[in-house]
Amino acid sequence: MDGEILPIILILLFLLVLGLVVYLNNIPRINEKVRKKVWEEVLQIKKMAEKNNPLTYRDIIIRLDSLLNKSLRMYYKNSENCGTNLKQAKNLFNKEEYNRIWEVHKLRNKVVHEDKEISSLELKNAYNIISLAIKKILYEK
């Protein structure tokens, strides 16, 4: 009888661990309240961008990159910089999306470090790329 109980206990333990793993993989990585707050900030930036005020373009690019960084930090539960987390996020996006996100991040770096001016087209493209990336990070697994 003891020989029959051990395999049953092992099978039950295996099923318990398997169930726990499935459960933990389905828990959202980002708190719903925080997710909504970040997305509201993205929408506020859109309103700023729609005003077509060239004096705000640089600030908008910086804020977009900051929200991308914040989203990645929440997703990975770390405090790494945006570039480090973007390297880790390669599997979250297809190749084209990933490359576009990097281009916007590099644009942000040029704005900050080289005092680059931003055109309205660059701003619109950057907003579209980063808002889609943030949405994917916040709402998709």
Image: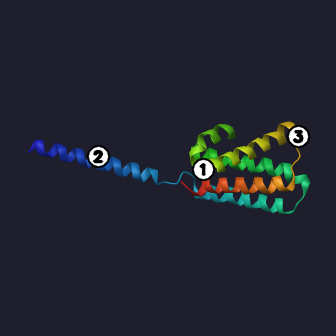
The x and y percentages for residue 10 are: 23, 44
Mark 3–mark 2 Cα distance, whole angstroms, equals 58 Å
Q: Is residue 2 left or right of residue 15?
A: left
Is disc 3 placed on a helix, strand or loop? Answer: loop
The N terminus lies in quadrant: top left
Q: Residue 94 bears which disc, if any?
A: 1
Position of 78 relative to 59 (above/below): above
Q: Amino acid at mark 2?
A: Phe
The answer to which of 38 and 54 lies nearer the viewer is 54
List x then y, in percent, for residue 36: 64, 60
Asked if disc 2 and disc 1 are in contact, CB closer than 8 Å, the reply is no
Disc ID at residue 115 = 3
Q: Quadrant of residue 99?
A: top right
Q: Is residue 52 left or right of residue 138?
A: right
**Neighbourhood count class around disc 1 (C-alpha, 10 Å): few under 14, some 14–19, many 20 upward:** few
Label 1 SS = loop
> Depth check: 16 or 133 in front?
133
Circles 3 and 2: CB atoms closer than 8 Å = no
Marks 3 and 1, the one that precedes in the sequence: 1
Q: Position of residue 109 (x, y in %)?
A: 79, 40
Colouring scheme, one of rainbow, by chain, secondary structure, one colour: rainbow
Residue type highlighted by circle 1? Asn
Q: Is residue 119 left or right of residue 46?
A: right
Can residue 57 be seen from the camera position used here?
Answer: yes
| Residue type of the residue flagged with mark 3 | Asp
The residue furthest left is: 1
Mark 2, residues whose alpha carbon is within 10 Å: few (<14), some, or many (≥20)? Answer: few
Is residue 81 visible from the viewing direction of this image?
Answer: no
Residue that carries the numbered disc 2 in the rendered image: 14
Q: Position of residue 38 (x, y in %)?
A: 68, 55
Determine crowd level at label 3: few under 14, some 14-19, many 20+ residues with C-alpha closer than 10 A: few
